[in-house]
Amino acid sequence: GAVVSQHPSRVICKSGTSVKIECRSLDFQATTMFWYRQFPKQSLMLMATSNEGSKATYEQGVEKDKFLINHASLTLSTLTVTSAHPEDSSFYICSASPVSSNTEAFFGQGTRLTVV
Amino acid sequence: AQSVAQPEDQVNVAEGNPLTVKCTYSVSGNPYLFWYVQYPNRGLQFLLKYITGDNLVKGSYGFEAEFNKSQTSFHLKKPSALVSDSALYFCAVRDLYNTDKLIFGTGTRLQVFP
């Protein structure tokens, strides 16, 4: 099956610094990728839709200036958490699908972000 | 708006017994339904999907799901549970009217006891 690689799997950073998370589709092209956030023992919350070559679409309540998304190529999207604070600590997951609504989405391994 | 509901936060079952994890949906038009499983600190793994065709869908690891249009349900089932099936299970529907994004249920934790 298709593979989506997310890196890093874990990161610890200091308050006020920025952290970049990468999401790559390894064997298919993805014009759209999705970024989710998951709190402990909760479901996935869609943060934004990353669109190749254009601006991301953010869900209501998600700060676009804090969570910068770049989708510069058909196989790579990045999420940068800027000026991170402890409340940004969470599990972040990306997903992508080959072009077609009939196909399932493939998920990255997730990134555990801890802001200290 | 498209949505799915998972009414059970947790399901407990003894190893070897059949298991069911419930999911109901509310969509405009034909539903594109999915089941995913998540192990601790990992991303989601695809189990199975219903797009069209047979109402009984077979997927990975012996799981299957039955699409029931009249009851708007898509319950996940397995004839004989394994301890290794213990994980978090998510039902999802694809929002065909909004970037094809997946809309997830709240998740059901399956605990299989030896």
Image (cartoon, rainbow, N blue to C red):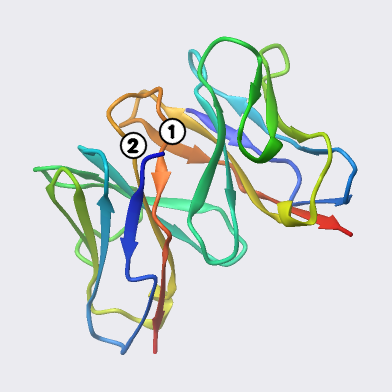
* Image quarter of residue A20: bottom left
Residue A58 point in image, percent of width and height: 28, 49
- Image-based side of B40 in relation to A21, left or right: right
Q: Residue at x 84, y 40 (%)?
A: B80
**Residue at x 62%, y 63% (from the top left corner):** A41
User: Helix, strand or loop at disc 1?
Assistant: loop
Quick one: label 2, few (<14), some, or many (20+) residues within 10 Å?
A: many
Picture residue at 29% right of the left edge, 79% below the top: A84
Quadrant showing the N terminus of chain A: top left
Task: Name the kind of residue labelled 1 in the image.
Answer: Glu
Task: State the separation of the CA atoms marked 2 and 1.
Answer: 6 Å
Q: How many marks?
A: 2
Of residues A28 and B51, which is closer to you in this image?
A: A28
Quadrant of the rendered image containing residue A81: bottom left
Q: Secondary structure at mark 2?
A: loop
Q: Is residue A26 visible?
A: yes
Chain to which the residue tagged by mark 1 belongs: A
Inspect the image, locate mark 2, and give the three-letter code of the amino acid beneath it.
Answer: Ser
Image position, residue B9 (x, y; %): 74, 51
Q: Which mark is residue A55?
A: none
What label does residue A97 carry, if any? Answer: 2
Q: Relative to residue A25, is residue B15 drawn left or right?
A: right
What residue appears at the point 69 percent right and 35 percent down from the top-left corner? B63
Q: Residues within 10 Å of mark 1 (few under 14, many from 20)?
A: many
Disc 2 and disc 1 in contact, CB within 8 angstroms: yes
Q: Which residue is labeled 1 in the image?
A: A104
